[in-house]
Image: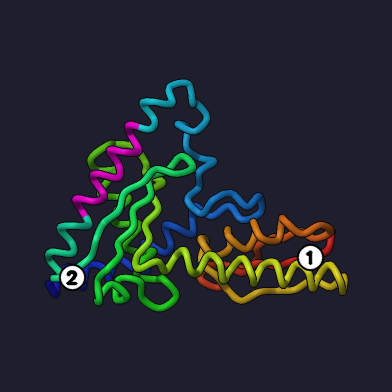
Amino acid sequence: MSETAEVIGTEEEKATAVAAGADEDTTAPDDTGAADSPGDAESGDAESGDDLLVREGDIAGDYLERLLDLLDYDGDIDLDVEAGRAIVSIDGGDDLEKLVGPRGTVLEALQELTRLAVQQETGSRSRLMLDVAGWRAGRREELRRIGRTAAENVAKTGEKEKLQPMSPFERKVVHDAVAEVEGVTSESEGEEPKRRVVVVPE
C-alpha cells in the first residue's frame, strides 16, 4: 500500500512537467496536446478509432482498479468516450480526495501514470482524461467563471488582467471561457509552474 502511494508522490512533479510540455496555450488547444496526434488528422476510419478509445478505457479501468485494491480504497470506475478521447472517472469512495491532492496535483500525476500504462499496452499516445470524485468537473466550472469574469472586466476597462498561475488543464479552460467574450483575447506567459493566463483587449 505504502509503495503505491510513494510512487504517486514521487511521480507527481515529473507528470506535471510532462503535462506542461503538452500545453500549447497561445492557440488554446486542449491540455493534452491534441494537435500533435496524427490519428486526429487521419479520421478516415472512425469505427476503429472508437474501438481504440474503448480499449484505452478498459486498460485504464483495469489499471486503476488494481491501484484502488493496493491502496484499499473504495470507488466505482466509469468509462466513456467523448469528444474523441476516453473518459475515465472514479467516484463513490471516502478516501478518493487523497487521489486529487492540493489543486489537483496528485490527480494530474495519476492521470499521466494512467496514460503511460495505456500507451504501454497499445503502443499509441493516449489523450485519456481522468477525473476523481468529480473534482475536475467542479474545477472546470469554477475556472469558466474566473475566465469569463476577467474577460468582461478587460472588455470594460481596456486594461489587461493577469490571473494566478495555473496548470495546463486550468489554463485551457480559462482560454476557452475568454474566447466566448467579444473584444478580448488571452495568452499565457511565464514558465512552469508559474505559467499564467493574461487577458488582454483585442
- What kind of secondary structure does the magenta stretch mostly adopt? helix
Seen at 22% across and 57% down, the residue is 64
- Can you name the residue that lies furthest to the top here? 44
Query: Answer yes or no: do the residues labelled 2 and 1 have beta carbons within 8 Å?
Result: no
Q: Secondary structure at mark 2?
A: loop
Q: Position of residue 3 (x, y in %)?
A: 14, 70
Q: Quadrant of the N terminus?
A: bottom left
Q: Earlier in the sequence, mark 2 or mark 1?
A: 2
- Indicate whether 81 appears above or below 40: below
Q: Quadrant of the C terminus?
A: bottom right
Seen at 61% across and 56% down, the residue is 25
Compute the Cα span from label 2 to label 1. Answer: 45 Å
Front-lying residue, 179 or 193:
179
Q: Which amino acid is tagged 2? A: Tyr
Q: Which residue is mark 1?
A: 200
Q: How is the image coloured?
A: rainbow
- Indicate whether 50 appears above or below 169: above
Q: Is residue 59 magenta?
A: yes
Q: Which amino acid is tagged 1? A: Val
Q: Which residue is mark 2?
A: 73
Q: Is residue 20 magenta?
A: no
Q: Position of residue 100 (x, y in %)?
A: 35, 71
Q: Is residue 167 left or right of residue 10?
A: right
Q: Which label number is shown at residue 119? A: none
Q: Position of residue 94 (x, y in %)?
A: 25, 76
Seen at 46% across and 39% down, the residue is 84
- The stretch of residues the image draws in magenta is 51-63
Q: Quadrant of residue 112?
A: bottom left
